[in-house]
Image (spheres, helix red, strand yellow):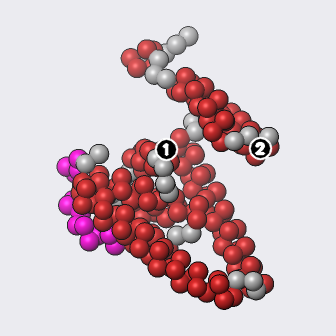
Amino acid sequence: MSERPAQRPHVTLWRIFAVFGLIGATSFGGGVVAYLRAQLVTATAWLDDGEFLELLEVSQTLPGLNATNMAVLVGDKLRGVPGAIAGLIGMMLPGSLFIAMLGAAYATYGGTHVVTAVLGGVAAAAVGVMTAVTVQLGRKQLDRWSDLVLVALTLIAVSGFKLSLLTVLGTLGPVAVLLHWPHKARATGETRP
């Protein structure tokens, strides 16, 4: 992943730090994927949608937060190990400072109705942003009926039947792999009857 594509301009370590610092300072919870896409695909054009989805998928399989994993992966893709470090520090620094200040304020004012209402509003906004990104990216990735069926089965199993995500992935994951396994006919461009 350390290779930088020839068509991309040289990106400075400071620029990597600044972009991920902006993402870290302006994103909340699950909505961070929207901010990542807006900055990495739309604003900077460091990635296209396909590359973004590939790195997002990798970041979701790694332990830790998706956003910090993405910062490391994108930084590495742009500038190698120094880029990965710049992205990681940029992503983590604003949130760390904010959480330290918020923790002090919450210890003092946490039980008030105003704070509870604000946190409820932030949670609702994050759900809305995440839904919008899911729809945008889903249109590009979920192009077969079988994909939609797998999404629906996952949603029903986790939300409806309260099965653990590990159980659902262990069951539906192999099915998804088999459905997307490259068949000989697909690889050669032939159509099947």
Residue sitting at the far top = 193
Nearest to the observer: residue 73 or residue 42: 73
Q: Position of residue 63 (x, y in %)?
A: 48, 49
Query: In the rendered image, which quarter is residue 148 located in?
Result: top right
The residue pinned by badge 2 equals 162
Q: Alpha-carbon neighbours of circle 2 within 10 Å: few (<14), some, or many (≥20)?
A: few
Describe residue 145's horizontal placement relative to residue 22 as left or right. right
At 22% from the left and 67% from the top, the residue drawn is 12
Dot 2 lies on which element? loop
Q: Quadrant of the N terminus?
A: top left
- Residue 5 seen in the figure: no
Query: In the rendered image, which quarter is residue 126 located in?
Result: bottom right
Describe residue 14's horizontal placement relative to residue 57 as left or right. left
Dot 1 lies on which element? helix
Q: Quadrant of the C terminus?
A: top right
Q: In the rendering, which numbered label is found on residue 188? A: none
Q: Position of residue 137 (x, y in %)?
A: 54, 49
Q: In the rendering, which numbered label is found on residue 61? A: 1
Q: Alpha-carbon neighbours of circle 1 within 10 Å: few (<14), some, or many (≥20)?
A: few
Q: Position of residue 122 (x, y in %)?
A: 66, 73
* Residue 5 is a magenta residue: yes
Q: Amino acid at mark 1?
A: Thr
Query: In the rendered image, which quarter is residue 150 located in?
Result: top right
Q: Which range of residues does the magenta coloring cover? A: 3-19
Nearest to the observer: residue 20 or residue 190: 20
Describe residue 98's horizontal placement relative to residue 10 as left or right. right
At 42% from the left and 55% from the top, the residue drawn is 70
* Residue 115 is a magenta residue: no
- Residue 79 seen in the figure: yes
